[in-house]
Amino acid sequence: MSQIAVDDSIDSSPVSEAPSPMAVALVQLALACGGFGIGTGEFAIMGLLPNVADTFSVTTPQAGYVISAYALGVVIGAPVIAVLAAKMARRSLLLLLMGIFAVGNILSALAPTFESFIALRFITGLPHGAYFGVAAIVAASMVPVHKRARAVGRVMLGLTIATLLGTPLATVFGQSLDWRVAFTSVGVIGLVTVALIWYYVPRDQVDDGASFLRELGAFRRPQVLLTLGIAAVGYGGMFAMFSYIAGTTMKVAMLPESMVAVMMVLFGLGMNAGNIVGSWLADKSIMGTIGGSLVFNIVVLTLFSLTASSPFMLALCVFLVGCGFAAGPALQTRLMDVAADAQTLAAASNHSAFNIANALGAWLGGLVIAWGYGFAATGYVGAFLSFLGMFVFAASLRLERRNGSA
């Protein structure tokens, strides 16, 4: 089996021959399948919390701890695994990560107690960020430099399709049969991904200079930290709005509960559209795509707050906020550009940053609602976070121009 063909700006592994378009497509399909499983497993629990609560005789808010446990696993696991696995071949690491994810979900379905379920969700979250980071590097390494972001976007398409198809289906089956069936299904998707990676992802060699100290060097690079800051702060706005979309739909737009699912589908459609368009734009201009998406988010989230009482405008804004995911492939590719020889840690940490954005956005949105400003005000919170993200983005641009003129 041939080695992965790698562009010099991404990796320095040796190249034997360029892979065929079909080989590249099969690798991207295998990696996207893992993203589909991860996305389904991460978001399906949100619709199954009452069922979990009934099983373990806890309240629904207490059941929500499992979401926090998974997110904590993502935040911790991404950098830790990237550093500890610095000397592993990327194909082997992908197999290990997806194996842990598959087993973690199957064991989650068998959890006998609530405490064990929380612990298993934490463990299952550990490979999340590292998987996406390594998968992005592998996908980008197999295509020409001007097509990297689109390759990354195709891998992340698995995640965005999960929000549109995987999560609703897992929720329906989990509610109608048993929530344990949903997690078992996600585990099976993980096992299928292991098989696809085994068959289609080429074997690669570890760089002679690879080490955990070299990977840690990513956090000594200001541009890496600034890019992670853009993701952690600037994109918290999306989560500030989406975390409370059910309350906005029913209490502001005065729509029936059944319309919450429609809004979630519209958000998923927006994420998929944003991922596709954003990937194409990022291959033209990475920084232009990131900056443009921040401005777009400020406008759309403000419009959301101003018009949330209108069902039509609410639906439109939910779709457009989902389109803000256009920056996802651009940020992932930007991290690969500025990380130099610490690729894995930087790429994996992007998903830690997005989970921080998730927690920050949901927390600030909840504060505004608790203070009596209402569900629609979450859009203003999101616009403010995107505005703060612009300051981090501007700092990154200034540093780049200063280094370029030095």
Image: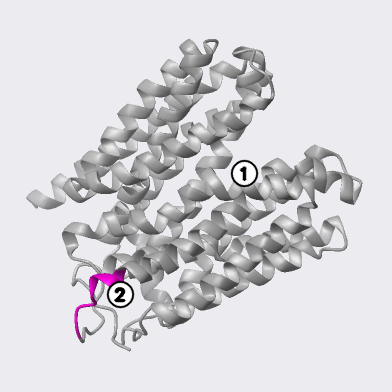
**Which residue is rendered at x = 62% and y = 44% of the image?**
168
**Which residue is rendered at x = 61% and y = 20% of the image?**
248
Task: Using the image, tell me which numbered label, if any, was put on residue 168.
Answer: 1
Q: Is residue 30 visible?
A: yes
Mark positioned earlier in the residue sequence (1 or 2) = 2
Most foreground residue, 370 or 166: 166
Residue under label 2, please give it: 23
**Which residue is rendered at x = 76% and y = 45% of the image?**
175
Most foreground residue, 221 or 210: 210
Relative placement, left or right, of 54 versus 203 is: right
Q: Is residue 244 visible?
A: no
Q: Is residue 8 magenta?
A: no
Element under label 1? helix
Relative placement, left or right, of 54 versus 213 is: right
Residue 9: give x, y in percent of width and height.
Answer: 20, 67
Element under label 2? helix
The boundaries of the magenta stretch are 17-24
Most foreground residue, 222 or 205: 205
Q: Would you call the spot at circle 1 few (<14 residues within 10 Å), some (14-19), or many (20 or more)?
A: some
Residue 378: give x, y in percent of width and height.
Answer: 54, 22
Display colour scheme: one colour
- The amino acid sitting under disc 1 is Pro
**Which residue is rendered at x = 37% and y = 65% of the image?**
28
- Residue 89 figure quarter: bottom left
- The amino acid sitting under disc 2 is Ala
Image quarter where the N terminus lies is: bottom left
Question: Looking at the picture, does residue 222 appear above or below residue 348?
Answer: above
